Image: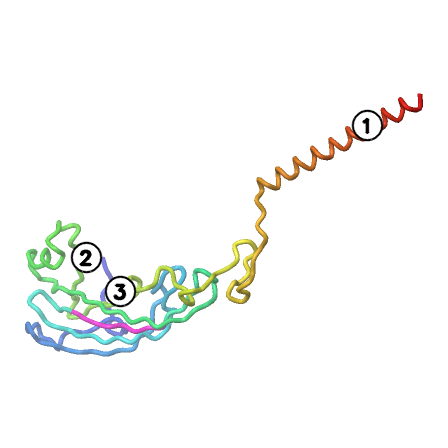
Amino acid sequence: MNARLDHRNPLVFDTHELGRRPGALQRQSRSVAAPGDFGIEVIGVPGGATVELDLRLESVVEGVLVTGTAQAPLTGECVRCLDPLERELETDFQEMFSYPDADDRSREAESGGGAEDAGEEDLFFLEDGLFDLEPVLRDAVVLALPLQPVCREDCPGLCPECGARLADDPDHHHDAVDTRWAALQGLADSLQGGEKDDMSGAEVGVDEKQEK
């Protein structure tokens, strides 16, 4: 059984003023502290950071349609050079919060007309005139995040050989050595060494014959 919504939670909103009158509108703006899981591995909204919300609540037959914009700071790291980076995120979202007594046809319409078990997972409901924006906001933020954030578009990244930051030394390079050529060179050196030994032995033999 789900816990009842707490109206003191900054991400819980009250729709009682709409009075279930289709067409009634209400606007709300609120600054809230971000929970700690608004992000992905490389970038996200820091826990506790201020998220600015502007919401438009519209009463419709099935429930309350919530349209909003969220603005929040982002912190993360460049996926190329691993330097820390900061960004500002602005994302839009829209979600229907259905009345608990909405009929089955309305529920299926809001969920795209799918099967009931699949549609129920996609539906959000009002509880005593309250709705929790957190899951909707989390999805909107995460979907708006860059999957491969970079400090700048032309970031050269790190040297794959030694890990040096290439932006600090544009001329940084390593002499490439092909291991196949190195092996051949080693074989050639050993063959040359063998030939020198054979020649030295032959010279010794000639000298011995001359002495005799």
Mark 3 or mark 1, which is nearer the start of the sequence?
3
Give the vertical position of 118 relative to 101 (above or below). Answer: above
Residue 91, x across and y down, in percent: 27, 69
Q: Which residues are magenta?
A: 66-73
- The amino acid type of the residue labelled 1 equals Gly
Residue at image point 12% right, 59% down = 110
Quadrant of the frame with the N terminus: bottom left
- The amino acid type of the residue labelled 3 equals Ala
Q: Nearer the viewer, mark 2 or mark 1?
A: 1
C-alpha distance separating marks 1 and 3: 83 Å
Residue occupied by mark 2:
122
Residue 13, x across and y down, in percent: 21, 73
Residue occupied by mark 3:
140
Q: How is the image coloured?
A: rainbow
Q: Which is nearer the eye, 206 or 104? A: 206
Q: Is residue 182 left or right of residue 104?
A: right
Look at the magenta stretch and give its main secondary structure.
Answer: strand
Q: Which is nearer the eye, 23 or 77? A: 77
Is 72 in the magenta? yes
Secondary structure beneath disc 2? helix
Residue at image point 13% right, 75% down = 16
- Res 201 → quadrant: top right
Residue occupied by mark 1:
201
Q: Nearer the viewer, mark 3 or mark 2?
A: 3
Give the vertical position of 145 relative to 192 (above or below). Answer: below
Q: Is residue 4 left or right of residue 21?
A: right
